[in-house]
Amino acid sequence: MPYIRESIITTVNKAGNVHIAPIGIIAENDGWVIAPFRPSVTLDNLAEVPFAIANYTDDVRVFAGCLTGRKHWPTVPVDGFPVPRLEAALAYSGLEVQAVDDTVRGQASSAA
Ligand SMILES: Cc1cc2nc3c(=O)[nH]c(=O)nc-3n(C[C@H](O)[C@H](O)[C@H](O)COP(=O)(O)O)c2cc1C
């Protein structure tokens, strides 16, 4: 069973607008797989600026807020990195896209 780290992912578009979304990142080999839905702002942003921050927080208001439309949470710049982190992050990881896999994962198939 894969190890999934539930995170708040921050990304930016080319204009520098910050987007925040709860996304589970999947440990694979020495890196992390990020699997945003298509379409999603996170996917679009990663195509424009291939960096993200995985923010680790126990502030459930951020998770709940993102799901109920309150998506604007304070962020702070990270030195030398193009994407800010969540101010409420207890810890965070800077991620850079190394490869893109366009196939759809995780679809269950069943035999009749
Ligand atoms: C705990 C948790 C884990 C999630 N994991 C994923 C994920 O792995 N991929 C994904 O696309 N959405 C995931 N979601 C849903 C996204 O947060 C939601 O679809 C979000 O709006 C992404 O679209 P956006 O980038 O347009 O905001 C998760 C939501 C929660 C609460």
Image (cartoon, rainbow, N blue to C red):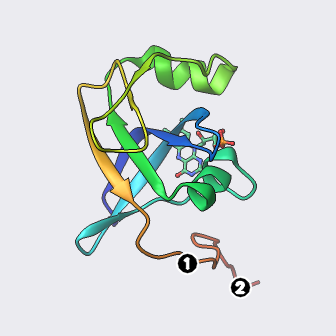
Determine whether 19 is above or below 13 in the image: above
Q: Amino acid at mark 2?
A: Ala
Q: Can you give x and y, in whole percent of width and height, for residue 101 in the image?
A: 55, 78
Q: Amino acid at mark 1?
A: Asp
- Packing grade of label 2 (10 A; few <14, some 14-19, many >=20) is few
Point 36% across, 29% down: residue:
77
Q: Which residue is mark 2?
A: 111
Q: Can you give x and y, in whole percent of width and height, for residue 53 in the image?
A: 38, 43
Point 63% across, 77% down: residue:
102
Query: Disc 1, ligand 1: is the CB inside 8 Å?
Result: no
> On the rendering, which quadrant does ligand 1 occupy?
top right
Question: Which of the 4 image quarters holds residue 78?
Answer: top left
In three-dimensional space, the C-alpha distance between marks 1 and 2, rounded to whole angstroms, equals 26 Å
**In screen coordinates, is 42 left or right of 83?**
right
Figure quadrant of the C terminus: bottom right
- Frontmost of labels 1 and 2 is 1
Determine whether 22 is above or below 2 in the image: above
Question: Which of the 4 image quarters holds residue 28?
Answer: bottom left
Q: Can you give x and y, in whole percent of width and height, for residue 51 in the image?
A: 44, 54
Point 30% across, 59% down: residue:
3
Q: Can you give x and y, in whole percent of width and height, for residue 75 in the image?
A: 43, 22
Q: Nearest the camera: 99 or 33?
A: 99
Determine whether 48 is above or below 55 in the image: below
Name the element at disc 1.
loop
Q: Which residue is mark 1?
A: 101
Point 50% across, 25% down: residue:
63
Q: Nearest the camera: 105 or 87?
A: 87
Name the element at disc 2.
loop
**In screen coordinates, is 71 left or right of 52?**
right
Determine whether 77 is above or below 53 in the image: above
